[in-house]
Image: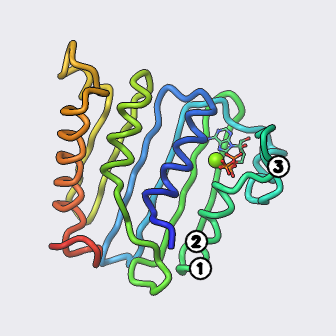
Amino acid sequence: MREIALHILDIMQNSVAAGAGRIGVSVTAGNDTGMITAVIDDDGCGMDERTLQEVTDPFTTSRTTRKVGLGIPLLRSSCMRSGGNFSITSQKGHGTKVTASFGKDHIDRPVLGDLAGVVADMSASFPKIDIRLELISGEECFTYSSAEAARILGEVPLSEPAVIEWLKEYISEGIKHIFGGVLDEIAG
Ligand SMILES: Nc1ncnc2c1ncn2[C@@H]1O[C@H](COP(=O)(O)OP(=O)(O)OP(=O)(O)O)[C@@H](O)[C@H]1O
Ligand SMILES: [Mg+2]
């Protein structure tokens, strides 16, 4: 089964293709709600009404190399299969917001996967884009911004291997701190 992190990567790649200067990823999980909700929003080119309506249909894509766009339909069906929900809103010229939720303890829920690796690698690959991560559970919150990390690093690029390793470690710690004891796959 596909990991949630890989679905998020797919959606972030759409944001990159849409020319985003900022991509926000927020993951909220709680024992109170029994849900995991991921929100990916960007300030990219957005979609018109018609594209937006067609976008959950696997036969819609703006790709020219291949006729079928799968990122969004795959995520949507994974959400639906695990007792969650899926929605996408977009405004042409302003940006797009994808909201995907999963039943936290549903047997068909995909595991979180390597979210730290996805966010660190995206930060390294697209240094001009501010990649933000927010993890929330109950009163606890962890935030990360690649633009902020770059500012702190000064001359050292985010693509420096030692920096990527450090970022992965740092974000992994955040995931453990926020989701430990909340998500079965993360040790508490
Ligand atoms: N964040 C976004 N901003 C603007 N347009 C978007 C965004 N996300 C998706 N789209 C539009 O929706 C289409 C479908 O996206 P989807 O991820 O399902 O498929 P794809 O990216 O075309 O192909 P694949 O994900 O299989 O590589 C995209 O081709 C694009 O036109
Ligand atoms: Mg895609």
Q: Earlier in the sequence, mark 1 or mark 3?
A: 3
Residue 47 quadrant = top right
Per the image, label 1 sits on a secondary structure element best described as: helix
Callout 1 crowding tier (Cα within 10 Å): few <14, some 14–19, many ≥20: some
**Horizontal side of residue 165 vs 10, given as left or right:** left
Local secondary structure at mark 2: helix
Q: Nearer the viewer, residue 22 or 63?
A: 63
**Local secondary structure at mark 3:** loop
Q: Amino acid at mark 2?
A: Ser
Q: At x 73% / y 58%, what residue is drawn?
A: 56
The chosen color scheme is rainbow
The three-letter amino acid code for the residue at tag 1 is: Arg
Alpha carbons under labels 1 and 3: distance apart: 25 Å
Check the picture and name the quadrant holding the C terminus. Answer: bottom left
Q: Which residue is mark 3?
A: 67
Compared to 157, does 67 lie above or below? below
The residue positioned 68% from the left and 27% from the top of the image is 93
Residue identified by numbered label 2: 78
Depicted 102 relative to depicted 25: above or below: below
Q: CA distance from mark 1 to mark 2?
A: 5 Å
Q: Nearer the viewer, residue 142 or 69?
A: 69
